[in-house]
Image (tube, helix red, strand yellow):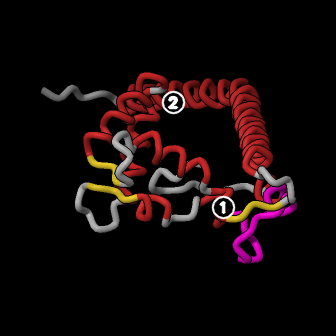
Amino acid sequence: MRVEHSNATQEFLMIRHLAAAAAVAFAIGAGGAVFAPAAAQDGADRSDRGSADRSERREKRGDRLKQRFDRLDRNRDGALDETEAKRPMTRVFERADRNRDDVVDSDEVKALSEKASRRNSARGGRVEKRFQRADRDRDGRVTRDEFLSRTPPWFRRADEDRDGRVTREEIDAFADRPQRRRRGGDQE
């Protein structure tokens, strides 16, 4: 059912709708003007905080790398060769190889992973992934040679001149530069 209005009534209704729309637009605009600076400041604070968090993480990562370098540089010559860099990997393999046959099978990986998980839940999965990546021939068994054939990713990236050695200067430069996100779980 349609109601007919006179022209004067139609004009009045149109003006009333326009006035209501203008009031809503004004309220939104005024509210936006009131809240926009606060929102912009909040966004700037978050951005600054994110930047500070990244800087702090980068600094902590750099400190850990430098500490690792100092710990691994046993002969104190100011440089690491691959053998020194692989020392932690050698220890992991030896812990996993319970029967000392220079081969780590799935039961030994599982035992080491469970032990690592008890100390830190994320570690167990990393142990398993590390051994899976090392199993080049996919036979479910990892030999010492398979496990130690891979140079640690941080060592490869830090070795700027590709001479097979990472000097203190190279590790300092590597620690101070931003790193892109890695895939595959390579840990630094």
Residue beneath disc 2: 21
> Residue 45 lies in what quarter of the image?
top right
- Look at the numbered disc 2 and give the secondary structure of its residue: helix
Residue 106 visible here: yes
Direction front: furthest residue? 100
Q: Work out whether 99 lies above or below 86.
A: above
Q: Residue 109 or 47: which is nearer the viewer?
A: 109
- Do the residues bearing badges 2 and 1 touch, measured as CB atoms within 8 Å? no
**Residue 154 belongs to the span the image colors magenta:** no
Q: Residue at x 54, y 56 (%)?
A: 182
Instruction: State which mark lies toward you, 2 or 1.
Output: 1
The amino acid type found where label 2 is placed reads Ala
- Between 170 and 139, the residue placed more toward the observer is 139
Q: Is residue 51 visible?
A: no
Q: Position of residue 107 (x, y in %)?
A: 26, 40
Q: Relative to residue 115, is residue 59 drawn left or right?
A: right
Question: Of the residues shown, which amino acid type is indicated by label 1?
Answer: Phe
What residue sits 66% from the left and 61% below the top? 155
Q: Give the quadrant of residue 33.
A: top right
Give the magenta part as a residue range. Answer: 158-172
Q: Identify the disc placed on residue 155.
A: 1
Q: Position of residue 184 (x, y in %)?
A: 45, 55
Q: Decide which of 117, 86 is in the foreground and name it.
A: 86
**Label of residue 140 in the image:** none
10 Å neighbourhood of mark 2: few (<14), some, or many (≥20)? few
